[in-house]
Image: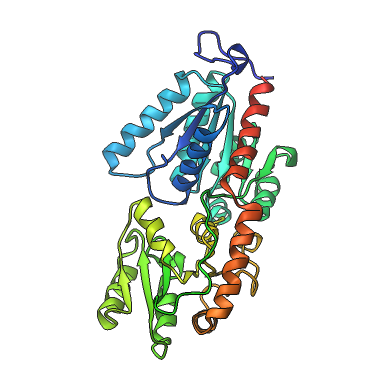
Amino acid sequence: MRGSTPGSGRHHHHDDGALRVLSIGPTGGQSGGMASVVAELEAQNGLSDAPVQLRVVDSGGIGPTPRRAANFARSLLTAGTARADVAHLHVASRGSTWRKMAVAAACSLRGLPYGIHLHGAGYRGFLEAVSPAAKRRIERFFRRAAYVVVLGGPWAQLVTEELGVPAERVHVVHNGVADGAPPVTPWPAARPRRVVLMGRIDESKGVPELLRAFERLDGLTDVELVLAGPPVDPRVVALVEEAVRSRPGRISYAGSLPRSEAQELLRTAYLLALPSHAEGLPMVVIEAMSRGIPAVTTPVGAMEELVTHGANGFLVPPGDVDALAEHLVCLLGSTELRDEMARAAYGTWAAGFDARTMYADIRACWRSTADAQ
């Protein structure tokens, strides 16, 4: 049992029945999949009959450098002083890990237990790239966590085998979204068949392959491609801009959209294309399926726990333009197949990727951690 440091500001939930949780990472209003998870946790907590006292703290991962530095410093101060029973640290690779290790140290100094919520798609590659000394520090960070939440089986295996976390402290919790809606079937003949890609405009999301695959669809009428996401890689952004110029009206780039506008765009999609080279369990695919929008994506990360090839979407090998074009044509050329997959995608979401399930599973981690003190 970890003891609390005298005068540290710890406040046990036993005293007044209210569990106090610090969520340290992105805030729900920011862009990206991690922020979407935080937004869903906040929303579900607000809907709970007995909400925990959930305080969301920006750890400085997003924004201009001066603001990021100020937010990071504030997150360290909060971790070291705020009244809380558990700190829930949202962790991805590179800078996110180093920042949360500092936050974890601030927690440990006062005896505040912390849990890790691992989101990073490329975490295995990150661990392979760091020095042996840095790897040992990361191992200590993970092993000292009261619990580690991962998005699927591959990540559970990674943290137990590579980082030495005891299996009983590892919890597979699928990302989830709320407010799903049954798909519109049959697909209205008057509506354009819109392919949507949402994510960073870079090579990791398979944007160059999608553009090349879409070039092969010129024979299909009433088909369009809309890309939306932050312009991360200038070379790939230039490819997108050239594609927009060469196929006006068929290809468009919406830029980086606020969460509400991104969700509106997604609701207009005939299908979601996400031919990524690395993912965890992408929120955008779950959001699409909650609306009955099938995805053409890749079997990376925990994607195969969500998408069943040929049933509720298609899985193509990363980087395979031929397979990507073939499966886009397959769905775009048959509204009957699309309708069938749309119903299956919605069923998959309803059966296991609802935000209420995600919140309940993570809340159980918070409660058991606080009860162990």
Residue reaching furthest left? Answer: 245
Residue 109 appears at what percent x and percent y? 53, 20
Image quadrant occupied by the N terminus: top right
Number of numbered discs on residues? 0
- In the rendered structure, the answer to whether residue 293 lies left or right of residue 234 reads right
Q: Which of the two residues, 195 or 343, is positioned nearer the viewer here?
A: 343
Give residue 209's quadrant in the image: bottom left
Q: Is residue 155 visible?
A: yes
Q: Is residue 120 above or below residue 241?
A: above
Residue reaching furthest bottom? Answer: 219
Residue 111 appears at what percent x and percent y? 58, 19
Q: Which of the two residues, 227 or 139, is positioned nearer the viewer here?
A: 227
Colouring method of the image: rainbow
Residue reaching furthest top? Answer: 6
Give residue 197's quadrant in the image: bottom left
Q: Is residue 315 visible?
A: no
Q: Which of the two residues, 184 or 204, is positioned nearer the viewer here?
A: 184
Residue 186 appears at what percent x and percent y? 52, 74
Image quadrant occupied by the C terminus: top right
Q: Is residue 116 above or below residue 303?
A: above
Residue located at (34% from left, 60% from top): 232
Q: Is residue 49 above or below residue 295?
A: above
Residue located at (64% from left, 39% from top): 361
- In the rendered structure, the answer to whether residue 354 lies left or right of residue 65 reads right
Q: Which of the two residues, 177 or 57, is positioned nearer the viewer here?
A: 177
Residue located at (41% from left, 36% from top): 59
Residue located at (70% from left, 49% from top): 161
Residue 334 appears at what percent x and percent y? 53, 83
